[in-house]
Image (spheres, rainbow, N blue to C red):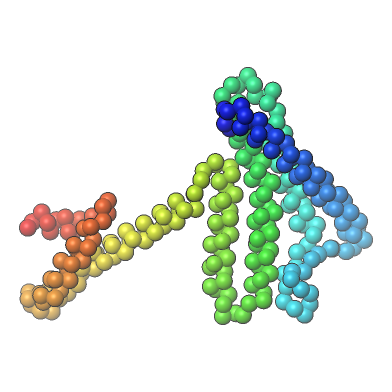
Amino acid sequence: MSQDPEKYGRELRSEERRAIIWLSYFGIAVALRIEYQRAIDAGQRPFINFFCNYPCPHLTVYIVDALNVLIGFWFLYTICILLFFSEDWFYRLGKRGTQAREQFRRFANFFMFSYPALGGALTVVSALSFLLPESSQQLYWIIAIYGLTALGISLLDRVTGERNTLRTLWEGVIDGFKVATELVVEGLLPILEKMVNRLSKGKIPTRLVSLRLRVAKLLSRRKGRVKIRYWQRRKSLT
């Protein structure tokens, strides 16, 4: 939480307005849950089909089950936002109290957005999958899982306070792929060299020697790359 009084006051007012709106939504969700309980008592199970009804392929979402999870998440939101607003409870803790309140605010934002965002996105993605042909399902779900993962990481950023976590993770994956590729390429060279050496009875073709030198030169351009002990031993012997 910023120590700037003007910025702190602006953030506090924003949280208060947001809390009023979302607590009203929380009351509406509870009222709907009570109303649908009458239908359950009558032996019914209310549901919504996305995006169409039978005989069209669709995803069925049971309203009461969805409301139960939503109310649970928003109840946790009310607890966390209450602790954030309770500045007098943490006043004696000083800086640690300020940090604790800020963490409760982050948790509140997570519980407020996580289920509507993730639940809604998963519902839309799943419903769309029923409308696609079987041949495109694999590619579709690869893209969908990546998108849902990116959304989940963005929501977790609200708790940790980190930024650009997804980009950092993606850069780490790319760097790992580069390192693995380099290790495979450089690791295959001694195997290929030994095989050719046996087949040619010690006379290694000049093309293979040239290829090995070009690959070694290309790999040496990268800074901080992994070194294979085989080539380190070869360099120490020459």
**Near-viewer residue (195 or 213):** 213
Number of residue marks: 0
Q: Is residue 171 visible?
A: yes
Based on the displayed image, in which of its 4 quarters is residue 145 positioned? bottom right
The residue located at (23%, 61%) in the rendering is: 219
Left or right of residue 131: residue 37: right
Based on the displayed image, in which of its 4 quarters is residue 144 positioned? bottom right
Across and down, in percent, residue 133 comes to 61, 80
Taking 159 as reference, is 55 above or below it?
Answer: below
The residue located at (74%, 69%) in the rendering is: 50
Q: Is residue 226 visible?
A: no
Taking 91 as reference, is 176 above or below it?
Answer: below
**Quadrant of the rendering where the C terminus is positioned:** bottom left
Across and down, in percent, residue 37 comes to 88, 55
**Near-viewer residue (232 or 98):** 98
The residue located at (62%, 40%) in the rendering is: 106
Based on the displayed image, in which of its 4 quarters is residue 230 positioned? bottom left
Across and down, in percent, residue 100 comes to 60, 31
Left or right of residue 69: residue 230: left
Q: Name the outermost residue toward the top.
A: 92
The residue located at (75%, 44%) in the rendering is: 22
**Quadrant of the rendering where the N terminus is positioned:** top right
Taking 46 as reference, is 159 above or below it?
Answer: above
Across and down, in percent, residue 216 comes to 19, 63
**Near-viewer residue (23 or 7):** 7
